[in-house]
Amino acid sequence: MKVSKAPRVVVVSLVAAGWFAVAPARAVPPPPPGGGPSSVNLSPVAQAGKQVQEAQLQVTTAQQTYQRARSRVESQFKTREDWVTSQKAVEKSKAEVEAAKAAALKALYARPDYKAAKAAWEASDKKLKDLQTKGGDQDQIAALSQQSLNQAYELKKMEAAALEAEPKYTDAKAREVEAQKQMSALQSEVDQAARTDPECLAAAQAVTTAQEQLKQAQLNLASIRKSESDARAAAAKAKSDASRQKRN
């Protein structure tokens, strides 16, 4: 059986630049040992899908390259006193938030009303799982599912209210937000420095180029899929018309 000669492309990776170009293939590579699949035997949709995967890989590679370049710039800031102080403030406030949260929830879990609400939810959830396992009535399953969701939502509301009513938690949360703001301001300085760093600039451009290549590959795949779908629909219509003419 002859293999139809579909258009062939070869992806030329420019790893150093973080992007790739598509150029006409000059030669068809031999099939892999053992008779495994090769790009020659792929359908147009499969070939286009393969190009999308390769383009996505190029985007990921370019993004990783940029992150490494940015991390190098960031490392120059991490020894600064204001950075060290802000980082410690973030870590301290996070620890205080978690400690206050644990204390507030522990008190909530001991309350009779919370225990009753949780027991009701657990009973509904168990009944729901039993019905699902036994293949029970679908209307009952739907009603129990909604009831279980409502009860779980009420538990979450009780937990949120308990945290909001605990001053130690809200104060710690406010300190955490402020510490994060200061850290974000320092990160903005890193971003500014990265915008003038040659390595970061090249890596950022590579990301943009790779993303554009990915978009084009995705558009190409969508176009091929539509063309094949239209062709199948036209063939089905032609077959139906021919059958109708025969009957007439």
Image (tube, rainbow, N blue to C red):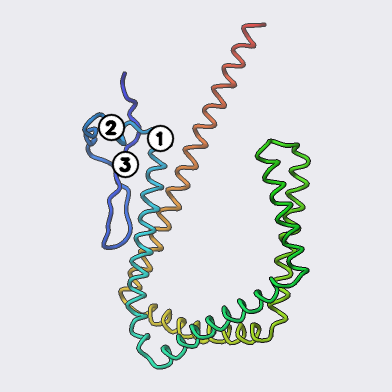
User: Considering the numbered disc 3 on the image, is that residue within a helix, a strand or a loop?
Assistant: strand
- Mark 3 or mark 2: which comes first in sequence? 3
Q: Quadrant of the C terminus?
A: top right
Q: Is residue 69 left or right of residue 176?
A: left
Disc 2 crowd, CA 10 A, few/some/many (<14, 14-19, 20+):
few
Q: Are circles 1 and 2 on residues that touch, CB within 8 Å?
A: no
- Give the residue displayed 59% in from the left and 12% down from the top: 242
The 10 Å Cα crowd at callout 1, few under 14, some 14 to 19, many 20 or more, is some
Q: Which amino acid does label 2 sit on?
A: Gly
Q: Which circle's residue, 3 or 1, is located before the other in the chain?
A: 3
The numbered mark at residue 44 is: 1
Using the numbered discs, state the Cα–Cα distance from disc 1 to disc 2 in whole angstroms.
18 Å
Does label 1 or label 2 sit earlier along the sequence?
Answer: 2
CA gap, disc 3 to disc 2? 19 Å
Give the image location of residue 64, x and y in percent.
Answer: 36, 65
Q: Is mark 1 on a helix, strand or loop?
A: helix
In the picture of the structure, the residue carrying the numbered disc 3 is: 9
Is 34 or 196 nearer to us in this picture? 34
Towards the viewer: 53 or 87? 87
Q: Which mark is residue 36?
A: 2
